[in-house]
Image: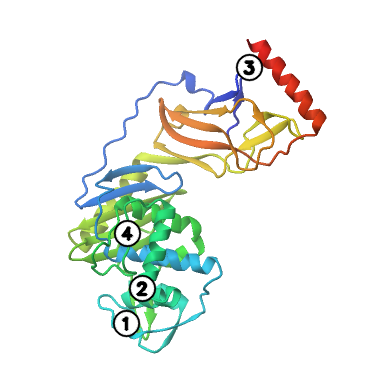
Amino acid sequence: MIPFKKFPVFLFFSLLIAANAANAEDAELSTPAAPTIAASAYILMNYDSGKVLAENNADVKLAPASLTKIMSVYVVFREISNGHLHLDDLVTISQKAWETPGSRMFVEVGNQVKVEDLLKGVIIQSGNDASVALAEHIAGDESTFADMMNQHAERLGMKNSHFQDSNGLPIDNHYTTARDLAILTRALIKEFPDYYRWFSQKEFTFNNIVQHNRNQLLSRDETVDGVKTGFTDAAGYCLVASALRNNMRLISVVMGASSPNARANENQNLLNYGFRFFEAHKLYSGKTSLAEARIWKGDTKNVQLGLAEDLYVSIPRRHYNDLKAVINIDKKITAPVKEGTKLGTVNVTLKDEVVANKDLIALKSVEQGNILQRIYDSAMMLLEKSDGQ
């Protein structure tokens, strides 16, 4: 972790990420443009920072086909994490689930199947029947489950998505975007790392039927560990992929490609571009003190300031030494202050371009001081104000 340097008088801190940066040559940012991608829409995002490295038509609303199942699985994972559902719970297969067309897990009507098996059937085999079975088990019917999907989409900031079913079969008013799918995938990996491993599983056997994961990149590139394919006539061939190389994870989304090979190739092109020309760095840890500020009328004289979560940046390669970080702290902080209250900002720039801007928060609550402390600080604040005039 790189310490901040404190300057007197002013309530801000500044830092050159490398001490010798001032003497280094002022190299230009010369990252090549992203490759041409033959698809209706695409996006490439850094997982840690959320920085978009390449995009085209990323906010155009498109039919997602089975990419819908990423949201369905996310909802199921949330239900498991909050204790409403368990992996070994048994789900009774309905007539509707059994007769759902398209890609199937081959569950049989009336049988009881474990939630874990159904999840693998959705993730690995892209089973529409398994998606419907889980939706009905959790919400009673698929329509109510779709309402849950939309609530999570809104909470995650997926501004251009609306779901009508759990599996992505064609239906009116069912759409999402490349950007929203990247946001969703980032949340899924971050919140459920233990379950995410299933997305890298290359095959799954159920009912004595072996089915292979349709994500061709799992076999082509050992750094790829997910995520999901999709296809309908309306959507074209789609793929959300994620890869981890040298501790940097990228998420790529390609929608509307012309064939299974094309969706794999175009995702590979995006991933290779991102790993070749960009790098990611963790600059500061969350919940760790980065600065200390004077607090008035409190039961202590200082409040520790830091970030709510780790701060990562994604930058063009070979420009780490050109990063600058500045802390700005609010003036005249007065108690009481609750933990998590915003009291400033951390701003990171590269060649005067902002690459990260995060809230600086109180790491602990500070209560009001006693009457004598408050009277004394009130007098000192008046003196400081008069001295400044």
Q: Residue at x 34, y 25 (%)?
A: 28
In the picture as drawn, the residue positioned furthest to the right comes out as: 372
Number of other residues with Cα within 10 Å of mark 4, as a class: few under 14, some 14 to 19, many 20 or more? many
Label 1 residue SS: helix
Q: Which residue is mark 3?
A: 9
The mark found on residue 142 in the picture is 2
Residue type at mark 4: give it: His
Number of other residues with Cα within 10 Å of mark 1, as a class: few under 14, some 14 to 19, many 20 or more? few
Q: Residue at x 42, y 31 (%)?
A: 354
Q: Earlier in the sequence, mark 2 or mark 1?
A: 1
Q: CA distance from mark 3 to mark 1?
A: 71 Å
Residue contact between numbered discs 1 and 4, judged by CB atoms under 8 Å = no
Q: CA distance from mark 4 to mark 3?
A: 52 Å
Q: Which residue is mark 1?
A: 96
Q: In this orientation, does residue 195 appear?
A: yes
Number of other residues with Cα within 10 Å of mark 2, as a class: few under 14, some 14 to 19, many 20 or more? many
The label nearer to you, 3 versus 2, is 2
